[in-house]
Amino acid sequence: MTAQPSALATSEAPARVATTAPADGFVEALHASGPAPELGDGANVYGWLVGSWEMRIVDYPPDAPPREAAGEWHFAWVLEGRAVQDVFIVPVRSLRDGATPPPKGNRYGSSIRVYDAAAGAWKVIWINPVNGTEVHLVGRRVGDEIVQEGRYADGSPIRWSFVDITPDSFTWRGERSTDGGATWLLEAEFFGRRMPHGGDR
């Protein structure tokens, strides 16, 4: 049998550069026009976020004054409507310069949210490759808010919540506990306002 050439790049056979942009096919395969029917009412927990939002970011470092930045947050149904994915960018793309060292609070990451019908909750994974952050949370609607609970890598509890929700605005609040949840420290607030369709920045 004749060996088939490997699709993997080697030092003798460097990877070929695609002559056409692969993004269209990827986006088409990933994106969904709406939630999968089996999600039922569970789709309402995050479905309202679908679209693009302009963000005012306020970080509260423990040893420095509050730090503000402009951000953008984009949400879509993906994977045949069984998940909600986002791309979160701070500072906004129009202010990013690859030649300049990233500012404090630099974020260019993504969360994916998958509904667990048995638990009646959403599993959330946030990844920010800028600084290697990976966080796992469980999200639920609590009254008029959405509360996501998890832990940082050091084991300290975190609570990330969407509050003050309207059709065109919301506040995201990030809190951390150093005493097992007895008290909470506010680490960041994100103030979102819905962008017109398209959301280009």
Image: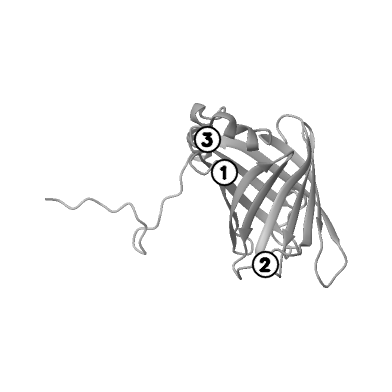
Please tell me which residue lies in front, 35 or 94.
35
Q: Is residue 176 visible?
A: yes
Please rate how many residues cluster around mark 2, counting C-alpha atoms within 10 Å: few if below 14, some from 14 to 19, many from 20: few
- Observer-side mark, 3 or 1, equals 1
Label ID, residue 121: 1
User: Circle 2 is placed at which residue position?
Assistant: 180
Return the residue found at the far left.
1
User: Circle 3 is placed at which residue position?
Assistant: 24
- Observer-side mark, 2 or 3, equals 2
The residues tagged by marks 2 and 1 sit, at their Cα atoms, a distance apart of 22 Å
132 above or below 58? below
Question: Looking at the image, is mark 2 or mark 1 earlier in the sequence?
Answer: 1
122 above or below 198? below
Where disc 3 sits, the SS reads helix
* Residue name at image x 72 percent, y 49 percent: 161
Q: In this view, does 38 lie to the left or right of 141?
A: left
Label 1 amino acid? Ala
Please tell me which residue lies in front, 97 or 79.
79
Residues under numbered marks 2 and 1 in contact, where contact means CB atoms less than 8 Å apart? no
Please tell me which residue lies in front, 73 or 139.
139
Return the residue found at the far right.
65
